[in-house]
Image (tube, rainbow, N blue to C red):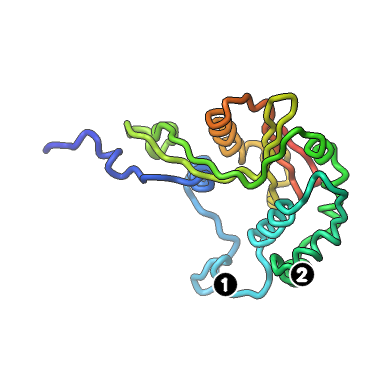
Amino acid sequence: DYVYPHMADVTLPSKISITEIKRKINAENDNDMPKFSSLVRGVPDFMKKTDTITAAQKGTIYHTIMEHINFKEKIEPEKLIDGLVDKGILSLEEKNAVSIDKISEFTLSDLFSRIKSASRIYKEVPFVMSIKASRLKEYENAAGNLVVHGIIDLYFEEENELVIVDYKTDRIIKNTEELRNKYKIQLELYKEALEKNTGKRVKECLIYSIDRGETINV
């Protein structure tokens, strides 16, 4: 009849990504029920073979474009994207899947101006940190820690404080508050990791919605 008192720690993973943490928390909020729009002969939509670029792939393309923006130079979005095609970073199909106007809209935003004026800009920054596993509902009875890893899209220095920017292309969410709530835990962990690693205060965590052309303070 003996019950091992630390069973929660036995099943604890050695490390976990920010994306997986976000997925787990969103699943908890949605009663852990994955939702598929339709089934054809038992195969969910995401497993169907298709030549069309998916929403997730399109998000990756936009992130690639954003990563290659040089904020200290004049940006011509069409030339920027054509240059990525010439270098083999993007294919013609990928180029045609995105809107140049969406990139232009970003270059005209107040956020772009703030980044351009920043004393330092950091892009695609990887991090690793340890957190208490009990912070996640799934491991609330665990005594151990989880090693969390992720990549911050961009952060910049403004008056010796830091501002985190995360690019999103989540077209499913139409409501700003819903978008903020969905990614709040992700940005909080970015903030925690950055403050631990740099010793500087993160004064803002921002989402830039590429589809909406909107900057959201989380």
Q: Which mark is residue 48?
A: 1
**What's under tag 1, amino acid-wise?**
Lys
**Image coordinates for residue 25, horizontal then vertical, percent:** 50, 41
**What's under tag 2, amino acid-wise?**
Asp
Q: Is residue 48 above or below residue 34?
A: below
- Residue under the point 57% across and 39% down: 186
Q: Please give the residue where the numbered disc 2 appears in the rendered image.
A: 86
Q: Earlier in the sequence, mark 2 or mark 1?
A: 1
Q: Quadrant of residue 183?
A: top right
**Image coordinates for residue 10, horizontal then vertical, percent:** 27, 42
Q: Quadrant of the C terminus?
A: top right
- Residue under the point 13% across and 37% down: 2
Question: Is there CB contact under 8 Å for labels 2 and 1?
Answer: no
Q: Which mark is residue 217?
A: none
Q: Is residue 21 above or below residue 39?
A: above
Q: Which class describes the residues within 10 Å of circle 1: few (<14), some (14-19), or many (20+)?
A: few
- Residue under the point 69% across and 26% down: 161
Q: Quadrant of residue 96?
A: bottom right
| For residue 21, side relative to residue 172 (left or right) | left
- Residue under the point 33% across and 34% down: 144
Question: Looking at this view, is 18 or 140 the one in front?
Answer: 18
Instruction: Tell me if I can see residue 30 in this picture.
Output: no
**Image coordinates for residue 68, horizontal then vertical, percent:** 73, 54
- Local SS, label 2: helix
Q: Marks 2 and 1: which is nearer the front?
A: 2
- Local SS, label 1: loop
Q: Which class describes the residues within 10 Å of circle 2: few (<14), some (14-19), or many (20+)?
A: few
Question: Looking at this view, is 38 or 2 the one in front?
Answer: 2
Q: Quadrant of the N terminus?
A: top left
| For residue 51, side relative to residue 198 (left or right) | right
